[in-house]
Amino acid sequence: MTPHATQGEGAALMIPPSLVGVWKARAVEDAGTLFFVAQYFQLVRGLSPLGAGLWMVPMALGVVAGAITTGTVIKKVRPPVIMRSGLLVSCGVFALLSQMSVDSPIALFVGGVFCVYFGVSPVMILGLELAVGSAPPERAGAASSAAETIQWFALGLGVAVIGSIGTAVHRSELKGELPADVPADAARAAEDTLGGAVHSAADLADGTGDTLLSLARSAFTEGLQAAATLCAVWVVLGSLVAFTVLRGMGGPGGHQDQDGAEKAEAAP
């Protein structure tokens, strides 16, 4: 770091790039889940906003349960091991969600989402601790700010990438499958978003509208399956980073081990 580097720049440089990669894996899967969950509840399963909100409560409970579990096992297990284990849990659940259909039990979907957030909770908690701990005490605040910026950037990236892929699959599944009596404007709206399909179906005759809505819901679910598969692959990559690169960071209790301390002391 040059003598003229700002505090924020120094903190950003002190955050291990491998840790940034794990964060991105967590944030991308988080964003992908958020993008699809509310739409699935309301537009595919037909729940009211209140009902969808209540079914999303387990997402928060998963984070709480993961935080409690992390606080318990951190006394005996290294942070990278906990982070890797959480990511692998999320990966398995995404593999399950990739098999969801329009008629799958909603409780199964909710349970899967709970487990996803249970798995990413340790990454949220321990990632920030490792980032702040890797910086000198006088730069801890700047490191925390840089870490927060990285996570929000990855969250936005996840919405853009995962959402775009899901939408592309949705459009591909609908193209050429809609009945001939569906107006061109309604067809374009249905291909763009599931919300457009729901709105267009309400203005069509019962038989045509029902067919359009059924096809659009199936296409959206196909997009959800593709997004879940991509998230599973992305999380596997993040867990590999946690296993190979981060395994020397932090000892039980969240403190840096002796080898890590010696390396940090010897570093220029």
Image (spheres, grey):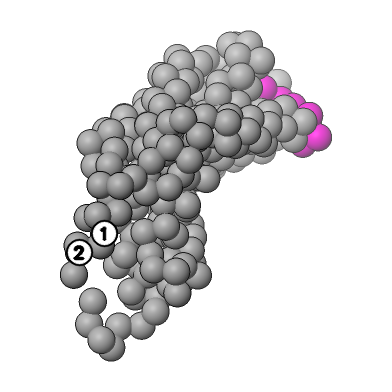
Residue 173 vs residue 266, the one in the foreground: 266
How would you rate the neighbour count of disc 2 (Cα within 10 Å): few for under 14, some for 14-19, many for 20 or more?
Answer: few
Does the segment drawn in magenta span residue 13?
no
Q: Is residue 189 left or right of residue 9?
A: right
Q: Secondary structure at mark 1?
A: helix
x 55%, y 24%: residue:
115
Q: Outermost residue, bottom direction?
A: 4
Where residue 8 is drawn, which disc sits there? none
Residue 233 vs residue 98, the one in the foreground: 233
- The quadrant in which residue 210 appears is top right
Residue 150 vs residue 203, the one in the foreground: 150
Where residue 267 is drawn, which disc sits there? 2
**Residue 66, image x, y percentages:** 58, 32
Highlighted range, magenta: 43-51
Res. 227 in view = no
* Residue 83, placed above or below residue 124: above
Tell me the residue that label 1 is attached to: 264
**Residue 245, image x, y percentages:** 24, 42
Res. 7 in view = yes
Q: Amino acid at mark 2?
A: Ala
Instruction: For the residues labelled 1 and 2, say whether their Cβ atoms are less than 8 Å apart.
Output: yes
Quadrant location, the C terminus: bottom left
Quadrant location, the N terminus: bottom left
x 81%, y 35%: residue:
50
* Residue 39, placed above or below residue 89: below
x 43%, y 47%: residue:
255
Q: Amino acid at mark 1?
A: Ala
